[in-house]
Structures are given as structure tokens and as C-alpha cells.
Image (cartoon, grey):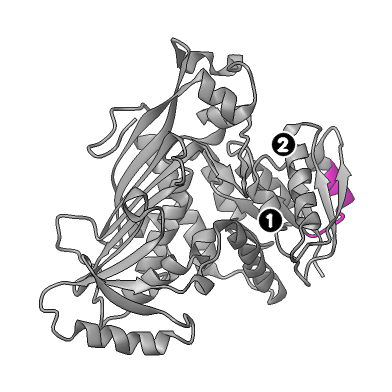
Amino acid sequence: MHTLLFLEPGHFHAALTLRERNPRVAPDVHLYAREGPERDAFIALVRSFNARDDDATHWDLHVHEPDDPVRALVDERRGNIVVLAGRNRPKLGTIADLHAAGLHVLADKPWLTDSAALPALERVTAGGPLAMDIMTLRHDVVARLIHRIAASPELFGALDGTSDEPAIDLHSVHHLLKVVNHAPLTRPAWYYDTRIQGNGLVDIQSHMTDQAQWLVGDGPGFDYRRDFDLDGARLWITPVPLDLFRASTGLDRFPETLADRIEDGVLDLACNGEIRYRLRGVAVRQRAEWGQREPEGGGDAHRTTVRGEGATITAARGPETGFRPELHIAPRGASGSFGTRLDRAFAEWRREFPGIGRRASPFGHEIVIPAALRTPHEAHFAMVLEDFLDLLDSNRWPAALAARIRSRYTLLARAHERCVQPAEPPAGGGR
């Protein structure tokens, strides 16, 4: 049985790994953190899982408040797995220290904010103990179906390398003020400091790069110098007035550390980014944007377009879909037997995706996904923990996983080098 150690959890993603009971995880959980609102928020969320009416957890949380949490955690060694989520700038150095001490690490993305951390990335991915980032997207049913369709030569063909448009086109809009787990999300003040949190080229972009890697396929394992060709990157701001900062942090004023980013009472937050590159020759564009406030009755918006020789896949969630996730596939060229081929594929896939179907849509065919197959984003963190435990219990750290992590964050670091100063938003983007 494994025992989890949580180190200075500065993001609610850390607690979400405990959202579900796990028979392979000891009920005693140890938290190493200094006093403060971030520690208190973690404790409150874990206790809410224990107190809920349906399928309550039974975590016995032990709180340790040493002056040096990292040293105390390593010296006392009350467990074998460390979960990290929070400040991104020192994260990779901390992972490297824990890794060198012989502890397994499951750490939220992103692992770095710039290229200065790349030497630590090399050390952490060179061998055991296991270190893995929390990539939740691979547990989303829409993303899984996109991958399944793109891997079907009969339906999709190969990724299109001839179009003027990217073969893999990823776009998301998140919001600084939002609701998570049925409650307004309170962000720490440092979240608004890109020197700590990172800018728009390193956070959500890590998920997008992982999705592109998944669609292209590991093959011999990714190598940045061989497989990636960075075409360009750009960065732009979302203005954060004091009232928005106050509503999302609970603080009355901006901290002095942000004074150089504030003009006329508004913080210029360089949280939006676009990266264009080729992955094994396949053109990829990924754009991550942050709006100020979550729309009433809405939420985050996503759009994924994957272009193949035989079909185009479109997944969307946003105002145009009523914030309901939709997945469509449209044949390219002659479409006479496409519906038949799609039905034949569905008949095979229903063992993994029971109940899926199709209906006509303006994009060709909408894939109907039963509600039972849809899981909330918050549930995916416990699923990633399960994946991590599978690797530990089999005593495996696949070389392809290490290579995928290493090349993914190298891309983001190089994009950051390419584009340090914010610019005007690209066409179709906004402030």
C-alpha cells in the first residue's frame, strides 16, 4: 500500500487526487506546509470529500508545519509518493531534489516557466524513481474518441500535411474568476505573477502539447531536436483591474511585487499565448487564452480541429454549443460510404464506449456520447493517480513516457525564449 505526502499544495489540483477512495492508498495522508490560506484551502477540500453524503472518502489527514517543509518531508519519509501542485517557478528544482532523495513524484503541470530549469528536467527524466506530470486530458471521453478516430486509417487516413491550415489546431479559453467544485475559486496572489506562475506559453500549453503528441503517436519516443521544429510563438495580455483581482484572491490591493506590471490601477497579465510548430512534420497550432470572468451559465471554452486525409474532426465546447461538449466528424472528398464505415467502427468501439452513436450535423456527423461516459474534469485527477500507481506497482517507467515529458517541456521553454515580450493578440484573439 502506498502513502501519499503533499508538499506545500498551492493549487486545488493537489487535493483533487484525493477526490475518490483508492484501495492502494493508505488512509493516512501527510501534509507538509507552512500556515496560510493555501494550506487551509487544501485541508478544507479534503475534509469536504470526507464529509459528502455520497461515496465519502475516509482520509486521515496529518498536518505537519515545519520551518523547512521539503527537508522535513525527506528526513521523516512518512510515505513513498509526493504530490506537488502550486508555484511553478521552483517546481522542477523541487521535483529534482525529491527524485534525488529516492521519492516518487506526481506533479501538476507545468513543470517549468522558462529554459533555466531544463538541466533539472534532464536529471528527473533520466531514470527512476518515477516522476510523472498530471495530464488529465487523456481521461476525457471526447479526447479519447478524437484519438481513436485519428488512429483509424479507414475513417481518417493520415494527418494532413498538405493543407495551409494546421493538421492539429487547439484553442481554449479559461477564466481568471471561475467556479470549481461548485464554489468560487480563490487564487493566491502569486498566481498573477508570471515570474512564478509562468506566462501564457507554459501552462495550458502543456496539455495541448501532450494532446498533439498523443495524436501523432509515440513511435520510437519523442526527441525534441529530432521531432520538433518551432515555427513561432506569441504572447499577449489580459488586463486585470483591481476589482477582478480582489474578487479572485480576497485581497484588497495588488502586492508590491507586481508594481512594475501595473498601470493606472490595472495589471497587465501576460497569460495568453500561441505556439506554432511541426511535430514529426505535422503542423500544430495551439492557442491558450484567459478571459476575465466566467460567463453566466457558461465556463471554459475549447475547440479542437484535427485534419486528416479522409476526414476532419471538430470538438467544441463554448457559447455556440451552449457550453455542452460536442464532437463532429466530416468526410473530405467523396462521402458515399462514410456513414457505413463510421457505423462499422462504432460497432467495434462500443466495447470501450458503450452506447455511442451518430446523427447528421452541419459538420457531417455528430458523435452522440451517452451521459454515462462523461466524467467531470475534477474526477480525472484520481484517474491519473491510478495510472501512476499502475506504473509503480509494475515497477515500470516507460522510456517513451520520460521522453514525452522531456520533449514537451523543452518545447515550452524554447517557445518562451522565442517570445519574451507581450504583443498584440493574434487575429481572432482578444483582450
Q: Is residue 156 left or right of residue 318?
A: left
Question: Along the horizontal axis of the image, is 250 left or right of 414?
Answer: right
Q: Hey, what amino acid is under mark 1?
A: Val
Where, by quadrant of the figure, is residue 80 drawn?
bottom right
Quadrant of image for the C terminus: top left
Pointer 2 local density, CA inside 10 Å: few below 14, some 14–19, many at least 20: many
Residue at (61%, 34%) from the top-left corner?
Answer: 187
Residue 79 in view of the camera? yes
Q: Quadrant of the N terminus?
A: bottom right
Q: Residue under label 1, please give it.
A: 105
> What amino acid is labelled 2 in the image?
Glu
- In the depicted view, which residue is nearer to us: 377 or 70? 377
Q: Looking at the picture, how far across and down is residue 85, in whole percent? A: 65, 46
Q: Is residue 77 magenta?
A: yes
Most foreground residue, 412 or 303 = 303
Q: How many marks?
A: 2
Query: Which class describes the residues within 10 Å of circle 1: few (<14), some (14-19), or many (20+)?
Result: many
For the residues labelled 1 and 2, the Cα–Cα distance comes to 20 Å
Q: Which residues are magenta?
A: 72-80
According to the picture, the residue beneath numbered tag 2 turns out to be: 38
